[in-house]
Amino acid sequence: MFNKILIANRGEIALRIIRTCKEMGIKTVAIYSKADAESLHVRFADEAVCIGPAQSSESYLNIPRIMAAVEITNSDAVHPGYGFLAENAVFAEICKKYGVKFIGPTAEMIQKMGDKVTAKDTMIKAGVPVVPGSNGLLKDVAQGIKIANQIGYPVILKATAGGGGKGMRIVRNDGEFDDAWHSAKQEAKASFSNDGIYVEKYVEEPRHIEFQIVGDQFGNVAHLSERDCSIQRRHQKLVEESPSPFMTEKLRKKMGAAAIKAGKSINYEGVGTVEFLVDKHRNFYFMEMNTRIQVEHPVTEEVIDHDLIKEQIKVAAGIPITGKNYEPLLHAIECRINAEDVCNGFRPSPGKITSFHSPKGHGVRVDTHVYSSYSVPPFYDSMIAKLICKAQTREECILKMQRALDEFIIEGIKTTVPFHKALMRNEDFRKGNFDTGFLNHFDFGECKD
Ligand code: ADP
């Protein structure tokens, strides 16, 4: 087992990783930017190294500075968390070269799944269903229109380097193609320095259902059941739950087997997520694979009663998995609490938290790095907490979530708590009657506290 793990991340996930390391008797090193000196992950790690100024490019994304911190602290492994360098194949390769274990898959696996066109191609070869579309990148508008007519409108243009819902445009007819093409390309270039675009059929009224998988260094891959992440705003997840209200035993078997096939096709090592779109007839299509721990991993932890960070560390240390698949034992829902002003188009709302009280009680979990008098810096992701509730049934879980949201006091900044309260009251949500377009016709006027 590792002696000392450096956590190349910040915020709640850094704290989350420190907790498991402590329970496993592993020493921890936090890295932090000058903007994060007061963050809890700095306080709770055994050692902490300031690696630079606030800008991510000078700190959490700066590989030479992170490697220097690894060296001076004599760390033998690096946990990248999610975001920042978690899916950066160059970083994984550099860690390997320095003889430091990158807790995640190999650079080659990251590369294979990080480029969406390559990933889709790998899945086609492995016999996993994918959304019909261009086999590879589009050369120009004319080729795009030709393919769109073959597969039928509506279609969606997507960036091969995509992430966070960026570089995507829905196109409903030939006339809309040109504008969508240019704006998708531009956004992809600005966000990922890669303007490669491909096209696929736009699946109407789909659910986003993803499978958590885990693979070890001996070729074993298992699934830990699904999460439904259909509650999204601008293709970004706000609420996740497990099991999916749309799931049947038969579908879980089929999708679970496809997720395992996806993992096995690249000899996947580590925890990962295989994302699918599911249409109303319960046809499912591979969308992408994330080769890291996800923000929403706690809902899986709660329904199968396993520590996924621990699994990740064990697999990285060369310990084999049992190979058993897991079914949800309970129902869990996660609400992402962001420092955002719901009534003003979810505008970021950084600043000082003057009062903070998090909900407690049976079945309630809060993963957060913030506290009363903490200042939310404007430089990073706006998520400040994750509220996770678990109960025997979905109905009970929603009631518990409502109770917990009522107890959540965060003053001084705006948060998404009022949105979650309104969502939990919504009849269609309560019935499990929603798809990825649900928030397009949601009345955000309901979100006043
Ligand atoms: P990102 O990596 O940017 O998050 P994804 O490929 O995971 O992009 O897609 C994000 C979301 O966009 C999905 O959850 C879904 O809501 C929507 N989406 C992507 N592809 C399609 C498609 N072919 N049809 C319908 N919706 C799609």
Image: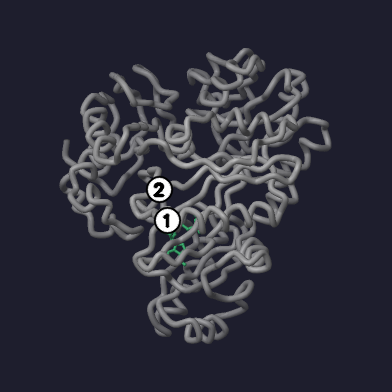
Q: Is mark 1 within 8 Å of ligand 1?
A: yes
* Relative image position of residue 337 (x, y in whole percent): 35, 35
Amino acid carrying label 1: it is His
Can the viewer see residue 100? yes
Indicate the secondary structure of the residue bearing disc 1.
Answer: strand
Residue 356 visible here: no
Q: Which mark is residue 18?
A: none
User: In this image, 90 relative to 420: left or right?
Assistant: right
Q: Is mark 2 within 8 Å of ligand 1?
A: yes
Left or right of 75? Residue 430 is left
> Which residue is label 2 attached to?
237
Q: Which residue is mark 1?
A: 208
The amino acid sitting under disc 2 is Lys
In the rendered image, residue 111, in percent from the top left (x then y), is placed at 70, 53
Nearer the observer: mark 2 or 1; the answer is 1
Question: Toward the viewer: 279 or 116?
Answer: 279
Q: Position of residue 222 (x, y in %)?
A: 61, 45
